[in-house]
């Protein structure tokens, strides 16, 4: 039976306390204060990089050749045209003969992608589809969206063997309910009045989809272990539960005070936190909200025990965090203020797309080579073995470094090099199992990197060429390791 | 078996401009100034030059590509002129080409010129490398700066020899204090102010653990050499300087491709070039035989590791020699008597020739207050690139023909 084979989560390292947002911009909207904090993508992260992080978690220790498709959902696409699911598939070093698609333009697109994957599996055309979802939405300074929106990602592998939770059914409603929108030219959302969104959309659609699901599959509230749905307004979130006849312990916590509303992946992230605690036979209902609502019914299986503790998931990420104490730094991460980068920082070389294509595996998937004669892993991939004792020609096979841990061989904190989050920290990494490379370090601050420290690789945006409208993605080393 | 270059080529004239932030001078002005001094020094005329080489590194911000800027500046009369480039070892590369041409018998008198106009880029430090490393590396390499690249070697050196950063920084400071002292004696040097260890240790960090005074000057300047067949050298001047060895070593890539091929605390190319150079020159014990040196001190840590790679200090013992004053102007082997890259300055394409200019003058005994006592053999070490991937040249020169 089709269902969830694996899950993966991602929450960026930085969190900003909403008090910092309010103390900076509360003068503009004195009534806007919300409690808690929200997750903030680092300057080198976007929806694609975070989706890759969640995807890496989801398929860790799995045979990547068994994945037949990648669906990606977001409302914060870095590109209007360049398929993001394709970038993610290449970065995860998946097969070329797979199907990729982006689901977009609505916050319910992630649940729709899951349903589409499930139906493709049921049709027998594909065995495993990786569904990734991520958002990095930005609100205008001083607005409710700025306080509400957090950044995050989630991934589910949908298949029909060894499922940890079966997908028993789904029910959807679709409406052109324009609670917020963004035109082709807009960087920020425009929204209608909150009271209208809350009363006419948020509460009604989630209740309608879950009620529709319950009716379709003859469910009563007591059949359900956990119900998962996003939080737009804290009080209205619990109102929905009451109206559905659920007790508070049946409602999976929404984490709004910890990460904020993370948009498209939000219900999936809450679902993962539910799966992290779920027992076999638990029934879980998940509903999304965005131009309508999708509701899905899951039943947890015995297989859940095999995956437990082996994923980074959501809960472990909640406690791995760094406070972003500067509102101005936050604005800079989101490119909301012009900063003085100097001529050095403004020097941007052209991006050669044909070079990127030829070297796509080494750049996006961090695939190097390993000598078949002397077994020396090498990055970037070589034609002639670099081991001076060997020197074999044309004896290389592909070798992937993105899932290998490493130790810091050397490093520096560079003040001269331009970085949006100085100092630029980079160094030489020796990989476990062999291989060495020079990489930027990320999710770390001054004084935190040490020689011999263990690091792992994280997919990041290496540069953003705004003039030519293209960004380069690559892997950085990070001491932030979720165990 | 190759014969090597020992005693086949001699330097008979050299010129070098003052280095510094020369806002009112173009690269062409600097070329003319350095070559005019070299011609006067040799006592020959421009028309006697049979071939020439121009060394420039950052062509984008300098004189542009090709050898034309040299030929056009000097109005060379349709002779063969070639531009060479090999990172910060560019000046030595120009000199090598001229020496090889003479040694091969292709010509009797050749000119090598190095020039760099760094101060027209609009910001401090070297020009951003991002445009110079090719489209593939743009996707792969961190935004490495020169101080950052060498700082990684300092991190590694401290780690390998269990030196606490605060102690290590004092040793590095001592290297810069010595060069500033020498530079203060040199009217052509860019930076002519003595500094203290405390100033150096407490200076702002540029790339941890390197601070401001661990970094060399970024300068404009030019230098030139006229080389001739050794057996005609004495007919041109009584005190020519003979090439005893000329070696270049370039990284194979193993440093940063294999885990255990490189300790990160030395420059393998320097070690390889040094071994070959000493063999070529017939030097058995460099610590006793070398009289004066100019080594590539782009950063204090570079100089520290060079003492070991050049087989002057034992591995891990360079810090002791530095603190003992072994390389001071009154030490056993004075290094950077002219102030080095640190204080004379570092116009990339000119630096290798500037080093040779000082050694040439030292061997001729013309260095005034910074004159080293009676050196017979001098060494220049010029390095381009980064500790993990680089180009190194080692020249050994002497006043006597063997």
Image (cartoon, coloured by chain):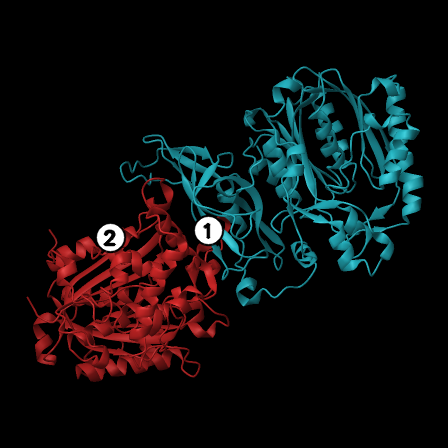
Chain colours: A cyan, B red
Chain letter for mark 2, please.
B
Left or right? Give the position of B54 relative to A284. Answer: left
Q: On the rendered image, what quadrant is the C terminus of chain A found in?
A: top right
- State which tag comes first along the sequence, 1 or 2: 1
Pick out the residue farthest to the left: B402
Mark 2 lies on residue = B271
The answer to whether any part of residue B128 appears in the image is no
A94 on left or right of A285: left
User: How dense is the environment of label 1, judged by Cα within 10 Å: few (below 14), some, or many (20 and up)?
Assistant: some
Element under disc 1: helix
Going 48% across and 71% down the picture, which residue do you hit? B121
- Vertical position of residue B192 compared to residue A35: above or below: below
Q: Circle 1 is placed at which residue position?
A: B137
Placement of B81 over or under A386, stated as above or below: below
Instruction: Tell me how far mark 1 sits from mark 2, CA to CA.
Output: 27 Å
Say whether residue B270 is visible: yes
Q: Please determine whether, in this image, residue B360 is positioned above or below residue A316.
A: below
Residue A95, image quadrant: top right
Q: Are marks 1 and 2 on the same chain?
A: yes
Image spot of residue A122 (x, y percent): 72, 19
Tags 1 and 2 touching, CB below 8 Å: no
Percent position (x, y) of residue B140? 48, 48
In the rendered view of the protein, which quadrant contains the N terminus of chain A? top right
**Secondary structure of residue under mark 2:** helix
The answer to whether residue A477 is left or right of residue A387 is right
Q: Are there few (<14), some (14-19), or many (20+) residues within 10 Å of tag 2?
A: many
Residue A226: percent from the left, percent from the top?
79, 24
Give percent across and percent down for residue A351. 54, 54
Q: State whether residue A88 is above or below residue B307.
A: above
Query: Count of labels shown?
Result: 2
């Amino acid at each position: 039976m089709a269902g969830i084979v694996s899950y993966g989560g991602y929450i960026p390292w930085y969190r900003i306390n909403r008090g910092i947002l309010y103390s900076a911009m509360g003068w503009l909207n004195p009534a806007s204060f919300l409690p808690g904090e929200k997750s903030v993508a680092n300057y080198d992260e976007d929806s694609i990089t975070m989706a890759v992080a969640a995807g890496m978690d989801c398929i860790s220790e799995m045979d990547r050749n068994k994945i037949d498709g990648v669906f990606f959902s977001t409302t914060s696409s870095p590109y209007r045209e360049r398929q993001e699911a394709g970038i993610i598939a290449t970065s995860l070093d998946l097969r070329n003969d797979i199907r990729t698609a982006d689901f977009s333009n609505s916050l319910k697109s992630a649940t729709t992608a899951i349903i589409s994957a499930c139906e493709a599996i049921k049709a027998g055309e594909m065995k495993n589809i990786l569904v990734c979802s991520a958002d990095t939405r930005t609100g205008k300074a001083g607005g409710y969206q700025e306080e509400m929106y957090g950044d995050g990602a989630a991934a589910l592998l949908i298949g029909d063997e060894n499922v940890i939770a079966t997908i028993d059914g789904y029910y959807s409603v679709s409406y052109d309910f324009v609670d917020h929108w963004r035109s082709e030219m807009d960087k920020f959302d425009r929204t209608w009045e909150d009271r209208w969104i809350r009363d006419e959309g948020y509460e009604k659609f989630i209740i309608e989809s879950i009620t529709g699901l319950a009716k379709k599959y003859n469910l009563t509230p007591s059949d359900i272990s956990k119900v998962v749905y996003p939080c737009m307004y804290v009080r209205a979130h619990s109102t929905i539960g009451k109206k559905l006849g659920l007790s508070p312990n049946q409602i999976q916590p929404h984490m709004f005070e910890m990460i904020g509303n993370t948009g498209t992946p939000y219900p999936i992230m809450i679902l993962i936190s539910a799966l992290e605690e779920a027992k076999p036979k638990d029934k879980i209902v998940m509903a999304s909200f965005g131009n309508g609502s999708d509701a899905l019914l899951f039943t947890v299986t015995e297989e859940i025990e095999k995956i437990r503790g082996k994923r980074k998931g959501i809960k472990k990420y909640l406690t791995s965090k760094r406070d972003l104490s500067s509102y101005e730094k936050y604005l800079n991460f989101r490119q909301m203020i012009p900063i003085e980068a100097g001529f050095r920082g403004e020097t941007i070389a052209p991006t050669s797309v044909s070079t990127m294509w030829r070297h796509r595996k080494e750049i996006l998937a961090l695939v190097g080579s390993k000598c078949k004669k002397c077994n020396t892993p090498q990055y970037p991939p070589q034609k002639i073995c670099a081991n001076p004792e060997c020197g074999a020609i044309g004896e290389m096979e592909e070798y992937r470094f993105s899932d290998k841990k490493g130790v810091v061989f050397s490093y520096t904190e560079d003040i001269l090099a331009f970085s949006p989050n100085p100092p630029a920290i980079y160094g030489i990494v020796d990989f476990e199992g062999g291989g060495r490379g020079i990489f930027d370090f990320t999710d770390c601050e001054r004084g935190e990197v040490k020689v011999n420290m263990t690091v792992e690789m994280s997919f990041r945006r290496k540069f953003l060429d705004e003039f030519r409208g293209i960004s380069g993605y690559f892997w950085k080393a990070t001491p932030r390791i979720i165990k | 078996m190759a014969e090597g270059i020992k005693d086949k080529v001699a330097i008979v004239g050299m010129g070098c401009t003052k280095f510094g932030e020369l806002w009112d001078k173009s690269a062409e002005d600097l070329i003319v100034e350095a070559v005019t001094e070299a011609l006067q020094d040799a006592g020959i005329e421009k028309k006697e030059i049979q071939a020439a080489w121009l060394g420039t590194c950052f062509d984008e911000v300098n004189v542009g590509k090709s050898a034309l800027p040299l030929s056009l500046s000097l109005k060379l009369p349709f002779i063969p002129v070639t531009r060479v480039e090999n990172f910060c070892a560019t000046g030595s590369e120009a000199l090598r080409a001229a020496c090889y041409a003479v040694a091969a018998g292709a010509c009797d008198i050749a000119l090598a010129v190095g020039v760099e106009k760094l101060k027209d880029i609009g910001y401090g430090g070297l020009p951003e490398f991002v445009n110079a490393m090719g489209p593939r590396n743009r996707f792969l390499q961190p935004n490495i700066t020169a101080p950052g690249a060498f700082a990684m070697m300092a991190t590694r050196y401290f780690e390998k020899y269990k030196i606490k950063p605060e102690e290590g920084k004092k040793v590095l400071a001592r290297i810069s204090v010595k060069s500033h002292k020498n530079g203060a004696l040199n009217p052509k040097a860019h930076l002519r102010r003595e500094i203290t260890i405390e100033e150096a240790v407490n200076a702002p960090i540029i790339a941890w653990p390197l601070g401001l005074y661990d970094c060399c000057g970024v300068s404009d300047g030019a230098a030139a050499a006229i080389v001739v067949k050794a057996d005609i050298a004495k007919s041109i001047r009584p005190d020519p300087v003979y090439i005893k060895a000329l070696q270049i070593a370039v990284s194979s890539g193993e440093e940063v491709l294999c885990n255990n091929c490189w300790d990160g605390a030395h420059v393998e190319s320097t070690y390889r070039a040094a071994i070959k150079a000493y063999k070529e020159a017939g030097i058995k014990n460099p610590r006793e035989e070398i009289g004066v040196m100019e080594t590539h001190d782009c950063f204090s840590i570079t100089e520290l590791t060079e003492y070991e790679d050049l087989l002057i200090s034992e591995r891990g013992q360079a810090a002791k020699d530095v603190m003992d004053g072994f390389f001071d102007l009154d030490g056993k082997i004075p290094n950077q008597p002219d102030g080095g890259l640190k204080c004379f300055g570092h116009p990339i394409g000119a630096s290798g020739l500037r080093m040779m200019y000082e050694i040439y003058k030292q061997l001729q005994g013309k260095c005034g207050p910074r004159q080293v006592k009676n050196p017979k053999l001098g060494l220049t070490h010029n390095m381009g690139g980064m500790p993990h991937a680089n180009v190194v040249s080692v020249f050994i020169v002497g006043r006597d023909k063997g």
